[in-house]
């Protein structure tokens, strides 16, 4: 039995997926909320939100993601970073998952990945959970009714949390699996209810496909000046570094909060929504994101709530620290209607430094920008991956290694070429710790970070005086209106300057040790910018 709107020539049956129970095609938000509640998948929260928990998995499982090693892709994948699956293992996985699905109800959403029609990908999401359908309807881009009538997917994603993989039979690591087959244009997800796997599997897909077209896929947020898309800024960074928070600037137009492409025409959002962390979310500091947590249809993940009032508790992380909400872009009043921008005028690389060493902002030369992009230094924050319970310093190349199928130099060279062609100014911004390392110091004040970014984006920061950082060689502003001078010199924020120096040396050594792997692949000017 089927229900909903779909291209009659492209049903699941036409794709060889048969024997299912009821299939609901392209339900709109009210119907998806209704279905999720009827099926006991969540509860109705204040304002009509859908409050859900994701069970055992409250973050991504990067070690369980596999790419099928076929001859067509074998020489293009960064295998040191991506686990391989044999074609035979995938075939068995696919057959067993389809057999498991028989008789069960499923929800289909036909959606676009990419705001630029010239470069978008048509993606069909087949989900066992109604709330996963609502989530991905928020996060990807929604066709109009006429586009749905003729929709034919470029790629299909099947997400079946109740399915358990067999590592020996399916050539995977555990019962949880995310398997990508580029030849068959198919992604299979099983054994996890964490909704972030849906969006990140599509991001990984775009990260593989777009470089062949000369398009830079970016793990970044983006915004532009009001009425002036030419003045675009992008914010690179892993989860927890502030991409969503800092791009949601009331003084600028939001293009998107997480995933973008940089083409020959400019910047475009891959998505149609936002997936924001909510731990300690404040109405004062982030009013618009906070407001979405009482908006009809917003998906609230892993948050404790009051059973009587159905209001959520932003401070209670007893379920998990990776508390999130998912909502469409139009929930933000200053979001772009087109999700398109110009070529980036400013490039911000966000890092969450748990060592408390880096300054709150630094200006980078193009060679230094390439160095820090390939290094991708940050700290994984609690909850974004399984097993991470407190900030862990790490190097995640291109600020998104878990989503990079190709070697880092592919993305680094694309970025460098585009910076050179379009003359972008690059900044490194630390949203991590100051006055000491994690456990001793304090998190960088968000008001200070916003003031520094405002000065960088309006051009006033570049006009002031800078000093050369003795440890990292980049330029650091000496004074910025509205920001305490002491904050700009991290050594002064420590009680013990000698302890800071030792911590800085330790971090420089970590940079040098990590970057050694890229030295054979880079040009001399980037080697000259390398530390150690």
Image (spheres, rainbow, N blue to C red):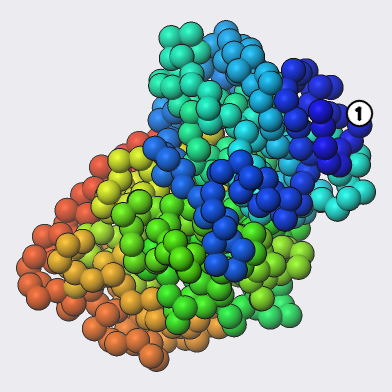
Q: Residues within 10 Å of mark 1 (few under 14, many from 20)?
A: few
| Residue placed most toward the observer, 137 or 402 | 137
**Label 1: which secondary element:** loop
**Relative image position of residue 54 (x, y in whole percent):** 46, 43
Q: Which residue is mark 1?
A: 9
**Residue found 73% across the figure and 25% down from its top:** 21
Using the rendered view, name the quadrant where residue 11 is placed: top right
**Relative image position of residue 202 (x, y in whole percent):** 62, 40
**Relative image position of residue 334 (x, y in whole percent):** 66, 76
Q: Where 207 sits versus 263, above or below?
A: above
In the image: residue 165, left or right of residue 199: left
- Quadrant of the drawing holding the N terminus: top right
In the image: residue 438, left or right of residue 198: left
Using the rendered view, name the quadrant where residue 285 is placed: bottom left
**Residue found 91% across the figure and 42% down from its top:** 149
**Residue found 10% across the figure and 72% down from its top:** 497
**Relative image position of residue 198 (x, y in whole percent):** 58, 40
| Residue placed most toward the observer, 265 or 48 | 48
For this orientation, the residue located farthest to the bottom is 481
């Amino acid at each position: 039995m089927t229900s909903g709107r779909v291209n009659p020539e492209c049903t699941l049956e036409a794709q060889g997926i048969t024997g299912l129970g009821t299939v609901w095609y392209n339900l709109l938000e009210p119907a998806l909320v209704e279905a999720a509640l009827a099926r006991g998948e969540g509860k109705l929260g204040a304002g009509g939100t859908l409050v859900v928990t994701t069970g055992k998995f409250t973050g991504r499982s990067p070690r369980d993601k596999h790419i099928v090693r076929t001859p067509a892709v074998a020489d293009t994948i960064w295998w040191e970073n991506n686990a391989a699956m044999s074609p035979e293992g995938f075939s068995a996985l696919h057959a067993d998952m389809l057999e498991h699905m028989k008789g069960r109800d499923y929800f289909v959403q036909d959606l676009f990945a990419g705001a630029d029609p010239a470069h978008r990908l048509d993606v069909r999401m087949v989900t066992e959970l109604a709330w996963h359908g609502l989530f991905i309807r928020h996060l990807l881009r929604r066709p109009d009714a006429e586009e749905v009538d003729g929709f034919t997917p470029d790629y299909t994603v099947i997400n079946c949390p109740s399915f358990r993989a067999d590592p020996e039979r399916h050539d995977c690591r555990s019962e949880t699996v995310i398997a990508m087959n580029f030849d068959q244009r198919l992604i299979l997800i099983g054994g996890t209810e964490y909704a972030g796997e849906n969006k990140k599997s599509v991001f990984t897909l775009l990260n593989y496909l777009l470089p062949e077209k000369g398009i830079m896929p970016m793990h970044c947020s983006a915004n532009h000046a009001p009425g002036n898309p030419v003045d675009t800024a992008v914010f690179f960074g892993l989860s927890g570094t502030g991409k969503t928070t800092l791009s949601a600037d009331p003084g600028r137009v939001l293009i998107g909060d997480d995933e973008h492409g940089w083409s020959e025409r400019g910047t475009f959002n891959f998505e149609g929504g936002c997936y924001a962390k909510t731990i300690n979310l404040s109405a004062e500091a982030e009013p618009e994101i906070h407001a979405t947590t009482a908006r009809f249809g917003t998906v609230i993940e892993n948050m404790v709530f009051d059973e009587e009032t159905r209001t959520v508790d932003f401070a209670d992380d007893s379920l998990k620290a990776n508390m999130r909400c998912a909502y469409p872009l139009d929930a933000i009043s200053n979001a772009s209607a087109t999700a398109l921008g110009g070529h980036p005028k400013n490039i911000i690389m966000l890092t969450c430094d748990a060592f408390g060493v880096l300054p709150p902002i630094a200006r980078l030369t193009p060679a230094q920008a390439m160095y820090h992009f390939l290094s991708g230094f940050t700290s994984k924050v609690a909850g974004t991956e399984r097993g991470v319970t407190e900030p862990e310093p790490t190097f995640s190349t291109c600020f998104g290694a878990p989503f990079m199928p190709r070697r880092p130099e592919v993305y680094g060279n694309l970025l460098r070429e585009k910076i050179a062609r379009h003359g972008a100014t690059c900044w490194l911004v630390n949203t991590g710790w100051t006055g000491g390392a994690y456990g001793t110091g304090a998190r960088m004040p968000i008001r200070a970070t916003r003031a520094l970014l405002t000065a960088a984006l309006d051009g006033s920061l570049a006009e002031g005086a800078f000093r050369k950082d003795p440890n990292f060689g980049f330029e650091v502003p000496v004074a910025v209106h509205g920001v305490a001078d002491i904050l700009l010199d991290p050594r002064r924020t420590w009680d013990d300057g000698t302890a800071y120096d030792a911590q800085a040396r330790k971090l420089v050594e970590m940079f040098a040790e990590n970057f050694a792997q890229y030295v054979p692949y880079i040009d001399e000017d980037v080697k000259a910018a390398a530390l150690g």
